[in-house]
Image: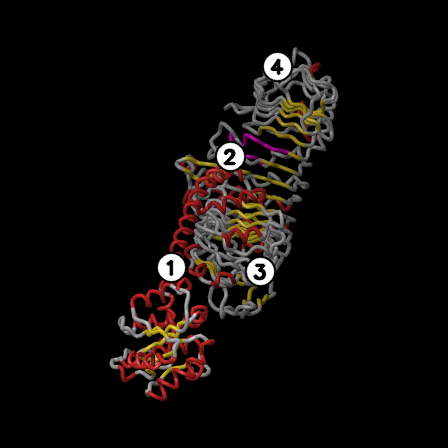
Amino acid sequence: MSCAVKCSSYANCTCIKTTLGFLSDCSGLGLTSVPWFTDIVISVNLSKNFLTQLPQDDRLPSKLKHLDLSFNKIQNFNSDGLFPFTTTKQLMTLNLSYNNISLDRDIYVDGVFRNLEKLQHLDVSYNSFDNRSYYCPDEVFKELKSIQSLHIDAVVNVSFGKEFSTLPKLTNLTLTGLSARKTVHNDFFRHLPNLKFIDMSSQWDRNVSMYSGLESIERGTFRRLPYLEVLDISYHRRIGLCGFTNVTHDLPFTSIKVFKAQYLGCERGGSTWLFNNDIKPLFSTKLQELYVDGNNLDKTELHATTFIPKSLRYLSATDNRWIPAKYAYFNTLHHLTNIKKIDLSFQNRHQMSQSLHSWQCAQPFSVAEIACLCKRFPYTENINHLTFEQNSLKSYQLTTSKNENKTHYFPAIHSCVPYFYPSFQLVIVPPNTEEIIIESARVGYSILPVYISTSTVKKLNLRNNQLYSFTGPLCNFTNLQYLDLSGNRATDISSYIFGALPSLRHLALDNNIFGNSKIFSTNNSIAIFENQTNLMFLNMSSNRLSILFKNFFWRSRRLKHIYLDHNLLVDWNVTIEHMSDLEIIDISWNQILYLSSNGMQLLEKSFTTNVSINMLNNPLQCSCDSLNFFKWIQKHRKHFLHFKNYTCNYKGGDLTISKTNILLKKDCASFIEVIVLSVIFIITFIAVVCTSLIYRFRWKLRYWYYVMKGAYGYHRLETEDHYQFDAFVSYADSDRHFTKDEMVDYLEKQRDFRLCIHHRDFIAGCGIAENITNAIHNSRKIVCVLSEDFMKSEWCMYEFNIALTESTVSRQGQNMIIMLRLGRIDMKNIPTEILYILKEDTYIEYPENENDRGIFWEDMAESLAS
């Protein structure tokens, strides 16, 4: 970490404290001279400056162990005619790469490295790049008694003389500039017998075209290196498989573990064959890693892979021209019991090459190449190629090699629990394989029912293969933890594709087109992850998804990361409350205007954990409809990533959520008040009008209610003969004796009128109001015995109002009410309705004088008869 301690006289240098001591970083500061450094510094970085000389010894700390002077303009070792590094004898690492210190006897004079007896790592590469001959003065390098690693230019005429054999600790050698020479001769490493690591790749050579240079490596070049473990001959585009074959024939005499032979052919050159003889020598090695990427391989001789040593752990054959469906050599891989990882990505990529210099590689064959081609021949005369049968599976019989009599059988495969298919696509891989990478390899157009020969696979990468349909299931992948099916543009996926993957933890399905799949418009989509109870990471971004069903993740309780960004979601409707480990939900770059109350509720249930939600770059809507959403998201802002960057468009400008809430509260509040007040006013007005109308016509409403409810219903009476009673008598209970004793005696017994007396004629079991209405409706006249008690009685007034309604509604205003005044009545106590009748119509007054009562009853009888 950076500290305040002063390490250098130049203030812009950075002082960094490490566990081993202080490091002073003065790189890229445009320095033309070297500053002073304090004694506490053990490492100095002066790279990428404009230094032309080595630092003066008095400017470097005496305990310095690491010095980086790369990418400067230093031309020699001498400083004022003195040998360098006199005060830095503890130096262990010296980097002088990318300078102008040419391999020349005039520069590498005797004694240059005299003070570096403890130096272990020296880099003088990328210094000799002029188009001329150079010389490596081995007498000078022999002074590096502790040297272990050397980076040096191996340009034209450079060789390692006999004095290099006096450096027993030199085990690592990196060669640059090989593109400037044509051939590596077989005595090149004669005096370096202790080498364990050789990097002679040409990937980073400068000032030399990547398609020119080294043409051949002679056979026998590495035969004298018994300790060699790592060899890289990559990126020499012109040595081809001829150079590859020469090298492989030397490797059995080494201790090779890692062999890199990548990009040995022209990018747009012709396709090549891998013969048995090319690879057969490897069978006698303990090789662990093999890289044959970018060699234009499209055909392999029968059983060639049987010569791959059993010790191999990693095979990389990317960027070739194999067609997996045609060259799946399932009967030759069973013996590779130690292999853990296979990478077959980027097949046939040459067809889409964008290199501006690829045409430069198309050169005529040289004499050496022609001779090499003549020596390369098939191991057997008849070259056949296995095809990957996709018919119904059966037991497969195979022989491992020409000289072996052992026959191996693979058992017949019939089903994949819990699904059954009559046939599968069989994939045979080494029995202990843990990782398979087949990215951008054009393996087919769909994932059919697949059965893999081993259940040890933990990681499978099939991204960018243009697999338009995921059908499956993928069987015998019971230990698969990582699956990448992204970038395939798949438009269809079955509900059982992952049904046999119980251990799956990481699933990448991004950059497909599942939004066009019919299954996501049905409830069947919830079965896709039914068996993924251990799933922790899911990426379904960029799939044009517009909806997910509520229980889509119901079985995936252990999910931690869910990525659904760059889709077409308009709301959140998926249950996630059961995911106790959930950490991230990414729904950015969708079409969400605002979340519904249901969406907010579903997300809020997960806030009991530390879940973080990303909703950036959604077209959030600034409106009163979204006000509740903005209030909610501001309340729970700690759960939303980059909350300060959330904006919505408001009146032509982008506002943050906080400002939007303030403005919308003001605008929507007045709007809501107007709506609420208007609604209240309208409801109140309607209620008042209805109440007034009901009160105004209360008696008519009551009348019609009971008429329609009556047993007889309502029938307009055409003649008076149809009435059941001549008169309905309405009286107070205190006046019943007058009615029963006098009216009944005179009018019924003497004059044969039929009166309706409620004490006598009301139907038992019917309501009083209903009896009253029916009685009035079936009586020709209504006689109201008017008294003080009559006007005090609610039922009497009810009978009067029903009679009045009957007269108005059913009798078309016919005068049917006879008012009989009984005793003295205070006119102030008479209701308006009765007073109106008394004033408009004649009423009969019961006389107190008994002599006058005869005339009274005659008048009453006449009134009833009229």
Label 3: how many Cα within 10 Å (few below 14, some 14–19, many 20+): many
The answer to which of 16 and 296 lies nearer the viewer is 16
User: In the rendered image, which residue does mark 4 sit on?
Assistant: 33
Q: Which residues are magenta?
A: 173-185
**Residue 563 in the image: x percent, y percent?**
52, 49
Secondary element at tag 4: loop
Rounded to the nearest angstrom, the CA distance separating label 2 from label 1 is 110 Å
Q: Residue at x 69, y 20 (%)?
A: 7
User: In the rendered image, which residue does mark 2 sit on?
Assistant: 214
Asked whether 182 falls inside the magenta stretch, the response is yes
**Residue 338 in the image: x percent, y percent?**
64, 54
Please report contact status of discs 4 and 3: CB closer than 8 Å, yes or no: no
User: In the rendered image, which residue does mark 3 sit on?
Assistant: 555
Mark before the other along the chain sequence, 4 or 2:
4
Amino acid at the residue labelled 2: Leu
Rounded to the nearest angstrom, the CA distance separating label 3 from label 2 is 59 Å
Amino acid at the residue labelled 3: Arg
Which is closer to the viewer, label 1 or label 4? 1
Amino acid at the residue labelled 4: Ser
User: In the rendered image, which residue does mark 1 sit on?
Assistant: 692
Secondary element at tag 3: loop
Asked whether 9 falls inside the magenta stretch, the response is no
Q: Which mark is residue 3?
A: none
Secondary element at tag 1: helix
Q: Is residue 74 above or below residue 303?
A: above
Task: Evaluate whether residue 435 shows in this view.
Answer: no
Please report contact status of discs 4 and 2: CB closer than 8 Å, yes or no: no
